């Protein structure tokens, strides 16, 4: 059976779908570690800070006085959690 291009969804949709899954996993890992320092990261805050502004959500921890060394540990833990999913 031969497929015409109109029969197949555009390739970018597949990649975008993967991006959404990856984004959700990254959000969950970030949310879990920020909760350790009392920050309840909502999805809309994650999207605004990380995706729209291109900034780190760990700035929320810095604004609450969390020391840089502790933030570095939180990032490491986030990366560990994210890589296991």
Image (cartoon, helix red, strand yellow):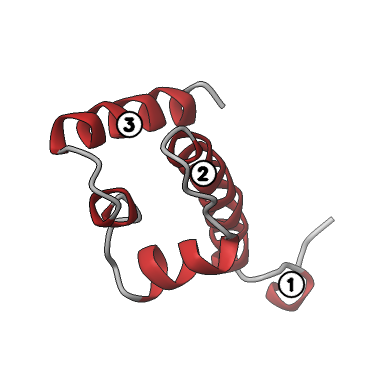
Name the N-terminal-most of marks 3 and 1. Answer: 1
Residue farthest along the right direction in this orientation: 1
Residue 31's mark?
Answer: 2
Q: Mark 3 points at which residue?
A: 74
- Viewer-side residue, 85 vs 50: 50
Residue 14's mark?
Answer: none
> In screen coordinates, is 31 left or right of 72?
right
- Viewer-side residue, 65 vs 12: 65
Per the model, the C-alpha gap separating discs 3 and 2 is: 11 Å
Give SS at disc 1. loop
Q: Mark 1 points at which residue?
A: 4
**Quadrant holding the N terminus:** bottom right
Residue pictured at 57% horizontal, 27% vertical:
85
Q: Are marks 3 and 2 in contact (CB under 8 Å)?
A: no
Q: Give the quadrant of residue 63.
A: bottom left
Name the N-terminal-most of marks 3 and 2. Answer: 2
Looking at the image, is 20 positioned above or below residue 6? above
Q: Give the quadrant of residue 13.
A: bottom right
Per the model, the C-alpha gap separating discs 3 and 1 is: 49 Å
How many residues crowd around disc 2 within 10 Å: few (fewer than 14), some, or many (20 or more)? Answer: some
Give SS at disc 2. helix
> In screen coordinates, is 1 left or right of 81?
right
């Amino acid at each position: 059976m031969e497929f015409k291009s109109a029969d197949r969804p555009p390739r970018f949709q597949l990649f975008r779908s993967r991006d959404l899954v990856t984004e959700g996993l990254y959000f969950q890992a970030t949310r879990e570690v920020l909760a350790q320092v009392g920050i309840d990261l909502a999805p809309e805050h994650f999207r605004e800070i990380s995706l729209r502004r291109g900034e780190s959500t760990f700035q929320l921890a810095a604004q609450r006085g969390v020391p840089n060394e502790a933030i570095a540990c939180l990032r490491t833990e986030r990366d560990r959690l994210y890589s296991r999913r």
